[in-house]
Image (spheres, rainbow, N blue to C red):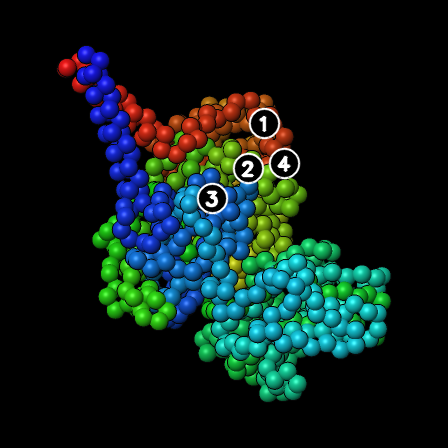
Amino acid sequence: MIAKRSTVYVISFVFFIFLLTGCALAATGGTSGLPTEKNSWNCSKEILITENAGKDLQGYPVAVVLNSSNFNFSEAKIDGSDLRFSSGNRTFNYWIETWDPENEEALIWVRLPSLSANQTTKILMRYDNSGAEAVSSGEKTFDFFDDFEGNYLNELDWSAESAGGGLVEVKNGICNVSAPKVHAYDSSMIYSKKNFEINSMFVVKRMKVTTGTDNRGPVLQQGFIDHIDSKKNEIKHETELANESRVNLETIYRKQKKNLYDLTDVNVPEREWYVSGIAWYEENNTRKISWFKNGVRDPRMDFASNDSVTNIPMHVYLYAASYKDASKNTGSMAVDYVLVRKFVGAEPTVKIISAQDESKVSSESVSENNSGNSLGDDSNGTSEQSISEQSISENNSDNVSEDNFEYSFKSSSENISEPQIAAGSKPNSETSGIRLSSPYEFNFSDLVNELNSSGINTIFLSVDSEDVWQYERFVKMAHEKGIFVHAVLLEDVNCTKKGADNLCQNTLDTVLDYNEKSLAPFDGIDIDVNSSGWESSEENAIDYRTLFETADKEAKENVSISASLPLNYTASQIKEIAPFVDFFIIKAYPGEDKELNSVSNIVDAVALEMGEIRGAGSRGIIEISVEEGFKDKYSISQLFTGLSDYYSNDSAFLGVSIFNYDTYKGLPQTQTEEKGFPIPGFNTLAVILAGLGAFALLKEKKS
């Protein structure tokens, strides 16, 4: 009997090892396919890249942005060194610009051998391989790259010049281009020995370092230059004064010069690193220049001219000089790395397919490109898999925003099974939102963690249109974290009052203009309707109607238009603006007789408005106020759940939003959400173990 039992256990153990080995091979594609260190990449994601400029691109680096919404950092090595990007049997060069697993943020540049005009290509990202070695390489990814390793300037790549006390020094991975002495006309410069064609971007991670008391500071330049002595052709981005608060642009093409002064403000604190990028490109037969700070384009620096912007190949250069009248300030441009990459105005969009989306990209949508023009090797044009624009639109209705991320609206109490939608798309499932007044008042990481823990994925941001560009950095960061941002306008303005019409129209126009030019446009525009303008006559209502008509006409297709309405206005006027809005927001506050903090009270309060919205064929978000007596965040979560349950069969119900975050963040959290088991695949492993155990017992019983 003991021998039989031993035999059963041995058989079970062998079967268990065999089964696990089979699972591992299935996860990594077996022993065939990509050349790997140990053929043990356990995780992978598909990435879709769409060419938008209408050009066939060769050797083009695309930015892959990872965050908590599209990537589990715990599954990769702590430094990301096990990442691999591939298509078919070919792996691609890449460079990790930033990798921050603690904050779950990363930026990786992947060099694609080719992208066909207006086509979508699919590549594979593999990770989770403890035996993989680092292969990240800036030199192999970009047309030019230097991270200044060692203690000497690479004379094969650079030439250096200096005058007076100017100095170029490389030490500990940092290059200092400096004017260290206090007298006029000190200068130092480095410029590449290699020339670069138009449609290039010169990117520098730099730090302004100044000393002394004179506010003017040194003059620092970054740009493209040809014929160093004669300066026949040049594109010069220049910063000066303390904290680089003056930003100028100068272009020269065959002595045709254009000077643009005080265009924007870098405003970098002392010894803070930032990334400055000059893009020099041609679009629609017009030569253009754009400037990017930390990856965000500043439209105030945009310049287009065929008269004073050259298309002749040029070097890249960095320059530092003391102020012309012997400023008391000295300083340098400290440089961590530089790179030159190819650039087109409408850059490719990148979308990481989530688990929900993988089923949408069916095998029918993937076609073999036997000509090798979609995605191949730089030299031999090896054919790879590609996805046509038509097949993408048929199998995946998601739109991709410029920021290249996918997001989903969902209820705070449950996962919605409806398809995900991309940033900028109009909402089609339940929304969990919150009203935010001042974006930079809070620590961004704390804000995101707070929203994620509460199941909130949409911010309705109160916008001051006088300086709408102040919100671009916040909107971009929110998009990177998978959060929608809608601009709320005219909260304290009655547009029907005499003389207010121009203010209201100008406010709307300012935001529409921002959305047209910004790399981080708002996902929606919400116009707050003042109730006093809707109480008396149709003429007053038409004033708002005209505003919504304009918004609907001028906004892009993927930008939603909404109207925020108080409880005490004429509900029947909803039908007048319903054709021009995508949804309404009903402010379920303040409660006159009783606090609106229960499902029954809120449902009764908004019944008339929801009925009108339903009758108009539109949808509505119910906005609750934290001031209505909620004791903690859990009670608000329960209210979200109750309203979702009540309106579960109502097509007019779009979700719930909170007014406002300032008060909400101060509420206690009395009940924590249950956490799943942290080991990936634990449930599958448990099933396997249970099955093997049952198998062994049955064998023993049968024996």
- Tell me the CA gap for discs 4 and 3: 37 Å
Relative to 15, say whether 442 is above or below: below
Q: Quadrant of the N terminus?
A: top left
Q: Quadrant of residue 189?
A: bottom right
Query: In front of the other: label 1 or label 2?
Result: 2
Mark 1 packing: few (<14 Cα in 10 Å), some, or many (20+)? Answer: some
Label pair 4/3, CB-CB below 8 angstroms: no
- Residue 643 is left or right of residue 165, and the answer is left
Q: Secondary structure at mark 3?
A: loop
Residue 215 at what x, y percent from top left?
81, 63
Mark 3 packing: few (<14 Cα in 10 Å), some, or many (20+)? Answer: some
Relative to 17, say whether 293 is above or below: below
Q: Which residue is mark 2?
A: 449
Q: Is residue 702 visible?
A: yes
Mark 2 packing: few (<14 Cα in 10 Å), some, or many (20+)? Answer: few
Identified at 35% across, 51% down, the residue is 36
